[in-house]
Image (spheres, rainbow, N blue to C red):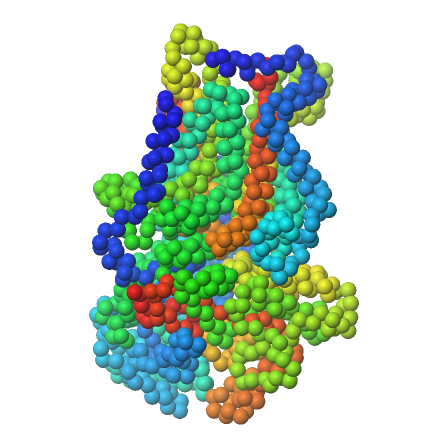
Amino acid sequence: MDRRAFLRSTGAAAASAIAAPAVWSPARAQSRQETLLIVSESGPNNLDIHGVGTNVPGYECSWNCYDRLISHEMKSVNGVPYYNRDKYKPELAEDMSIGDMSATFKLRKDAVFQDGTPVTAKDVKWSLDRTVTVGGFPTFQMKAGSLEKPEQFVVVDDRTVRIDFIRKDRLTVPDLAVVVPCVLNSGLVKKNANANDPWGLEYVKQNTAGSGAYRVAKWTPGTEVVFERNDKWTGGPLPKVRRVIWRMVPSAGNRRALLERGDADISYDLPNKDFSELKSNGKLSIVSVPYSNGVQYIGMNVTKPPFDNLKVRQAVAYAIPYQKIMDAVLYGLANPMFGKGEGAPTEVKWPQPSPYLTDMTKAKQLMVEAGYPNGFEVPISFDLGFAVVNEPLCVLVQESLAELGIRTTINKIPGSNWRTELNKKEMPLFTNVFSGWLDYPEYFFFWCYHGQNSVFNTMSYKNPKMDALIDGARQAAATGDKEAYDKDVKGFIDLAFTDIPRIPLFQPYVNVAMQKNVSGYEYWFHRRLDYRALLKG
Amino acid sequence: MRSIVLKRLATAIPSLVGVIVISFLLTRVLPGDTASYFAGPAATPQAIAEVRKQLGLDKSLPEQFARYVVDLAHGDLGNSLTTGQPVVTEIANRLPASGELTLLGLLIALGIAVPLGILAAIREGSWIDHLCRVIVTTGVSLPVFFTGLLLVYLFYFRLGWSPAPLGRLDVFYSAPPQVTGFYLIDSLIARDFETFRAALAQLILPAATLAIFSLAPLARITRGSMLAVMGSDFVRTARASGLTPKTVILTYAFRNAMLPVITTLGMVFSFLLGANVLVEKVFAWPGIGSYAVEALIASDYAPVQGFVLAMALLYVALNLMIDLLYGVIDPRVRLEA
Amino acid sequence: MTALDTTAVEPDARPATGLSATLKHARHVVTGNPITGFSFTLFILLVVCALFGPFLVPYDPLATNTAVALKPPSLHHLMGTDQLGRDLLSRVIVATRLDMAVAVFSVALVFVLGGISGIAAGYFGGWTDRLVGRLSDTIMAFPLFVLAMGIVAALGNTVTNIIIATTIINYPLYVRIARAEANVRRNAGFVQAARLSGNGEIRILLTQILPNILPIMMVQMSLTMGYAILNAAGLSFIGLGVRPPTPEWGIMVAEGAAFIVSGEWWIALFPGLALMLAVFCFNLLGDGLRDIVDPQRRT
């Protein structure tokens, strides 16, 4: 056999297969113009936000495929459209009237589900009943707005729904505009439900059954989701993008490459470093918006030594290399939450910077005062799912704490296990992010610092004074007592800083990289994309 | 022939039972409480207990195992919790993707390794022999994910020769009508050459990555068995009778040297199908390897068990096929059996 | 034809016996085959790095210095610096010890476990053979890398568990080789002689069979060392490697991979190169050892 000839022929065959440019048939070029390609690390595990264990990417499907009674108006923050916490706009409802102990919604006449059946009050009630009955996350989220029982949702007539309040709560109406209270096509879902599954969870997991602007046309779990525009949508101006393809690309390097070569239109989960570089090289448009009501922090379990000692906690707070983290880990794409400055007043807002700054002398002195002149040993844990930020962050913290004699070992905990570990409340030292959908300081503090000890109070912090301040602020908000509210909010923020069970580090940014011809990005509290406003070309 | 098949299958049964038991136990000691994962971020202890009951995780281990075996007997591998789909369908959908990739990788590897091995054997001890050895050893010394990333960087990002690493087909192509599940074959059946080219273009880099890694065992065994065969009497005789070196090498030596190559091929194939995991992750390939990894990380039992079982069955089937193929190539084996 | 004949008969293939002949042959292989010679040199370099690495490095491999983060190779940092400004050269050298340790310990462990049970299976046959055979068949039927992942995920990602996982997935290979070799020798003349002179079976196994199959096992060990390192690297890539900030080649490549597209190629390249060279060295060494011990080549 002539090996040379053989090699040459295979080589040529291989080369021609690689080098030939893709042949676009005209139809494909056309469809490319009307299609938006999104790439991200992971995709949804369930299209139904009421399902068991629906993950965060699943929220994006729900948001775009279903309508809610009301939604938020947009405002502009630093030139980026940003949801307006205080201004609502009707979505399925055309009119909302809020009484003392109830709110009444009138449905739009022209609202129809994607299968053509009209949206009725019955569907709304059935959907809201579903949220408070299925348990798990949706029920919990509704409870945050004092929406707890099916009896609260009353069908007045075919197009009118009344929601009764069980108590005065400032968060009830905002809670109706979050992702959870979406309206499903009850007739269609019931047809596909059975005795074991009265809410049709199995069906809605795989199929979208809403009145929203998009529907999921094809879903290959772990690979891609294809959305098609619902041309019958009447909830707002018809979206410009006809088709959205959302592909999962696990390698961050590949996601960046896809963007830079112009193959993908949007990605929002690149490492900060990539965003900061893409921003400066100007080939793509990059939008950076701080997380609303979100902070990344170092938490310490205050129920166990040594972190039950206030001086130790303060020592750690003075030993964190804050600025190094901002520079080397976040590449400046975050709001610093430290070094408020001497005598600067506490504001009525959250998040805001703590008074702490890196001061090793002070930290060492505090360690001596605390009775740990030689330090101690402790593991520091982080969620492996966010290793890009968490790992270098923990390495820097580890190195800095070593100067105090605090010898740490780094525990990487797989994402699936992270929640279990948080629930156990046994990790002594860890870093984590919390951000609340509802952008109110008392909401954040109720979940993270209140003695009811929710899963987000990862430090197991219990202080009656803190509880009184948080409850006071909630009460004052419900009754509209601004003065008492401001006093209590400042009170709990100050207390959180002096008691320092968790050390705020920074407010992370949502970064979105888009091709230059893509526009219309809107920031939402859930931080996922709203396809309805996006525009290509 | 049938008795060989039955005998082989009978010996495989204990290993399969072992695989089922071990994979069941292993997945149960994975860290992470599946129930609290699926109960959502703010679940109360009661909510977690409810989910646990829903998932049947409140039962004792033997009870869970018994249920698993009964389901298994009905061909039900359970549902994946993370993707929500039945494991059987998911594996069936993803297996062709992995199979096509692995087979093409192996084909490329064979196309390079066998000639290299023969060449090295003919010129044993020469610089060609050494060079072949260095090339194939380098290939097997590179971590596959590293090779994959380098190839993507070079051929997609830098040179732009290769299409975006976005799985089996560019997003604007639709899959050919399913016959075999192999896009290359299906698109040819459908006479859709554009799709064929698109699928091939997507396949080349990941397949090359696998091929680079599997050159060494194939080239090594080809070289070794060629050397052994060429030293044997019948080749000496053939040479002595004045046949051209080409005829001797290709028709006499090569044919006989094939046997060990085929055995190795089977082993390499089953090894690669498992080792695909990393390549699939780099190339966003929707195969079973990436499926198993995601599931393992999420402590999602059913897919891991299903994947392991599928691979074990494949391994058994493959070994059987090799045995039978042996008989075809070398009639003596058949007679002895 | 002629090429074959000259190599088949080696110049110093005199009928010598025992150690001296092996040594002589070893010297011949090392000096006669440039690649094997090269791999021996590389091996010595690796051993030196593993033993004395921490004393050789210019910087503390763990010390961060964010002021010089992501600097390309220069005279100050021959391999550049990583995201936190740590010196890559120092990290690559210090990592040698850990990676070698994973390789050496897992291979030693599998040699003891797999080797002994394989020899026993081959020598005694019967139920021992069946038991060992079933066990190794079962392991073989697993997709090996996923099995390793499962073990490390289940037991926790520590160096010990990575070693255990690597041992388990290599077990069938050792059993197979040891079994085959022992089986061939169980009725060999020298074994029969030992048996006749009243030695117990276990004693024969350890004093007669084991030393005889040691050379073949050595070849396998060298090859699996490389595989063990690759395996550990693969585990690191999917996040099941050692704890940060411990330097380890696989984890460094995995971390550096994210920086390739943005142009910081050195972070992944140098650890990757070190990893490749180590595996390369073990593989070639295995080949070289085979040349030494393979009786067919020693005619």
Examine the rendered structure and indicate whether residue C85 appears above or below residue A110. Answer: above
Whole-percent x and y of residue A151?
37, 81
Examine the rendered structure and indicate whether residue A365 appears above or below residue C168. Answer: below
Residue located at (62% from left, 61% from top)? C66
Whole-percent x and y of residue B272?
45, 39
Q: Is residue A461 visible?
A: no
Whole-percent x and y of residue A502?
61, 72
Q: Quadrant of the C terminus of chain B?
A: top left
Residue located at (52% from left, 50% from top)? C265
Residue located at (37% from left, 15% from top)? B247
Q: Nearer the viewer, residue C124 or A67?
A: A67
Asked which quadrant contains residue A492, the reply is: bottom right
Q: Nearer the viewer, residue A136 or C218?
A: C218
Examine the rendered structure and indicate whether residue B175 appears above or below residue A505. Answer: above
Examine the rendered structure and indicate whether residue A488 appears above or below residue B164. Answer: below
Task: In the displayed orientation, state which residue is furthest to the top.
Answer: B241
Q: Nearer the viewer, residue C189 or C254?
A: C254
Left or right of C258, for residue C178: right
Task: In the displayed orientation, state which residue is furthest to the front.
Answer: C75
Residue located at (54% from left, 62% from top)? A389
Asked which quadrant contains residue C210, the reply is: top right
Asked which quadrant contains residue A238, the reply is: bottom left
Q: Quadrant of the N terminus of chain B?
A: top left
Whole-percent x and y of residue C79?
60, 48
Q: Nearer the viewer, residue C196 or B228?
A: B228
Tally the numbered discs: 0
